[in-house]
Amino acid sequence: MEALASPSEISRIRAWLLAIRPKTLIAGVAPVIAGTGLAVYHGVFTFFPALAALVGAICIQIGTNLGNDYYDFVRGGDTEDRIGPVRVTQAGILAPAIVRAGMVKALGLAMIAGIYLVWVAGLPILWIGLASIACAVLYTGGPFPLAYHGLGDLFVFIFFGLVAVGGTYYVQGLSWSVDAFVVGSGIGALSTALIVVNNLRDIDTDSRAGKRTLAVRIGPTLSKLEYLLMLSISISVPLFGWIVLDWPVAVLCSLLVIPLSVSPVKKVIGHAEARDLLPALAETAQLVGVYGLAIAAGFALG
């Protein structure tokens, strides 16, 4: 775990920033930016639905982070042996009930944004919103927590990729787009790679705590292959779109992730200890952000 001052010495703002984990929010922001870039390209960009989608995505990501912090603690998934960003509940910085209340408030704000989007775009967004909020809780909570049964990777690919990009496009264009789901597969793959690094880092502590993530189930070697597969999917998406779907050549600027991925790949493949993966986690998060911005800019310029 990161070195940190005692709970009594941490300000309330600092405590909530630790709980929210702002650096992870790129996983919620990137697909909305990419979907909006595609909406600009198709001539259907609408400001307020795009803004509401962004607010909703950020709130769902915050709610998911707070839920993970709370539910991993009450389930015994977080222990003192854990290496990685501080979990405020386990560290005694914030009381469990306060973190749980924060999760409810964040998801409540997401619902408010969702009500507006349902008014704009209709019932399809209602079902998407309800499913997204439910899965934010069920990721580590409920009677069948997804992350504890090896389904976390699939959840991230679907909801932080296909659903987030497709839904962002839909609330602006009021139609589904094959392009949006293809873009979503690229964003979703990179977000999944982020989870792979996280779970690979925690594979030993998760195994001892009974948290059966996909990394625990398939082991470190196959997890490393999964990481490479996710990167390969993300790289293939703009090439496929340009060649097959007639996307503008500017989307190929998203291939900037290739040189940027060299460093995290080396760390993931060659790590000796869990702590060695901490830089790879930050670098993979950077890949998600760069990819989302670059592909959005490519569409907008196109």
Image (spheres, rainbow, N blue to C red):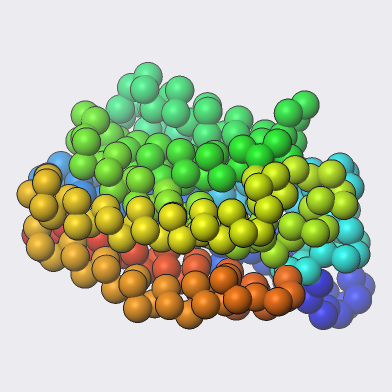
Residue 300 as seen in the image, left or right of residue 111: left
Image location (x, y in percent) of residue 141: 74, 36
Image location (x, y in percent) of residue 269: 57, 71
Depicted 129 relative to depicted 215: above or below: above
The residue at the far top in this view is: 123
Q: Quadrant of residue 217?
A: top right
Identify the residue shown where x is 9% and y is 58%.
248
Identify the residue shown where x is 56% and y is 61%.
224
Number of numbered discs on residues: 0
Depicted 178 relative to depicted 205: above or below: above
The reply to whether residue 18 is in sight is: yes
The quadrant of the image that shows the N terminus is bottom right
Residue 224 as seen in the image, left or right of residue 103: left
Identify the residue shown where x is 48% and y is 31%.
129
The residue at the far front in this view is: 221
Image location (x, y in percent) of residue 158: 46, 38
Depicted 93 relative to depicted 162: above or below: below
The quadrant of the image that shows the C terminus is bottom left
Depicted 36 relative to depicted 151: above or below: below
Q: Which of 208 and 284 is in front in this view?
A: 208
The reply to whether residue 109 is in sight is: no
Residue 128 as seen in the image, left or right of residue 111: left
Image location (x, y in percent) of residue 81: 88, 66
